[in-house]
Image (cartoon, rainbow, N blue to C red):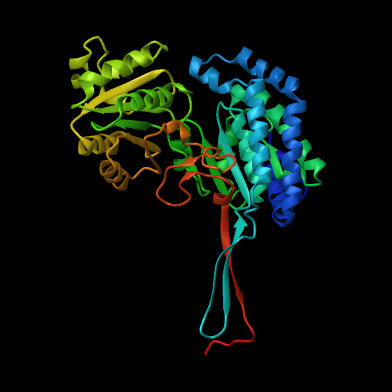
Amino acid sequence: MPVKTQNEGTFPPMHVLAKRAREAAGVLALSPAEQRAEALRHIAAGLRSETEALLAANRQDLEQADVSASFRERLTLTEERLEGMASGVETLAAMEDPVGQVLAEWERPNGLKMRRVAVPFGVLGVIYESRPNVGVDAAALGIRSGNALLLRGGSESFHSARALHKVIQQGLACAGLPEDAVLMAPDAGREHVGDMLSAAGLIDVIVPRGGRALVERVQAEARVPVLAHAAGLCHSYVHEAADHELARKVVRNAKLRRPGICGATETLLIDAAIAPALLPKIVADLAVEGCTFRADEAARAILPDLPAATEDDFATEWLDKTLSISVVDGVDAALAHIARFSSHHTEAILTEDAAVAQYFMQRMPSAIVMWNTSTQFSDGGEFGFGAEIGIATGRMPPRGPVGPAQLMTYRYEVHGTGQLRP
């Protein structure tokens, strides 16, 4: 129901929460770096001390969820995952504070001294779906970077998100920071998404974390700037000069380590020159672990039992143990395939030819491009950022994993000694 506040009339609940977050953002942005680090350490401690309560809340979500196996995997919390979340929060606490960093400074001929200084965005609105850890990662990144957050998680993860939110607010309070620095939608109502998208002047940046449909809706309807995290339709290209054993190991990891994350490889491209010898081995490696396939005509000429791929298959982010396969005639054909189907998230080339690797990487417009490694390294923690609020795939910065240093804007400071403009 709309919430009435004195002298404000009737406002949607998320607008009321955004106003509270706006006030807290002013306090957070001016707080000492050590105080924000202390809040993060309290949150990490809470994730460990409240493990049983958090797992119980997650079981409630899992019992009610009628979802696919891959969705359930993303929704599930375990002791190991909670420990990983706590460790990530501690890593952020130990990182250099991005607030107030001098990004550039120079002096003009008239003696004016100028500086560009990093400052927080203000209030971040994070709309996410099935993964409860996203709320914790976003909150920790916001606290480290001096930004307040307004969270709206998916209905399937509501109980988990609410229990995690309690731990976050307790950590803020223990450090003497306002609990309103991280606020959460009061329920799983769908109307809260629309309210956030219309909250211009209250929310500074919207961050959608979910499937293509969510991101497209946010981009179409938002009256607030959007830091878009597009689908992770990632490609691994095995060049004819690849080391065969390395390629087998990397492709297996890129696809199957965690098939449900955005950095998982969804399409394998392999050169025609080596496909007859290597493709059957790669398919056998993955099939024994339950992977299924969609293959183009050239791949099926080598392995006739593979199901035929459609155009839609190559445009699909499977988020599951399914791999699309295309046999290509060289690096330019691989680049053309990626240009046609990629979401511009992460692409990898596997080759021992350094010149070809450089050629591929220079011509790749995606936010992240890799050489001889797994696309599953597309992660803020693996980049040394502590965590990420998402992988930004647009052409405007920030791009790639968005950590605390990327959640900043800047102001210009001009220091004078009485100069007058003629």
Along the viewing direction, whichever of 201 and 215 lies nearer the viewer: 215
Any part of residue 150 in sight: no
Along the viewing direction, whichever of 268 and 70 lies nearer the viewer: 268
Residue 319 percent location from the top left of the image: 44, 23
- Quick one: quadrant of the N terminus? top right
Please indicate whether residue 100 sits to the left or right of residue 238 in the image.
right
Along the viewing direction, whichever of 168 and 38 lies nearer the viewer: 38
98, above or below 53, in the image: below
Q: In which quarter of the image is residue 32?
A: bottom right
Q: Quadrant of residue 80?
A: top right
Name the residue rendered at 43%, 52% in the picture. 396
Residue 354 percent location from the top left of the image: 29, 42
Please indicate whether residue 70 sits to the left or right of residue 233 in the image.
right
Please indicate whether residue 177 sits to the left or right of residue 329 in the image.
right
Q: In which quarter of the image is residue 5?
A: top right
Residue 305 percent location from the top left of the image: 25, 9
Total marks in image: 0
Along the viewing direction, whichever of 193 and 134 lies nearer the viewer: 134
Name the residue rendered at 73%, 49% in the picture. 24
Residue 117 percent location from the top left of the image: 59, 63
Name the residue rendered at 69%, 55% in the picture. 29
Any part of residue 218 in sight: yes
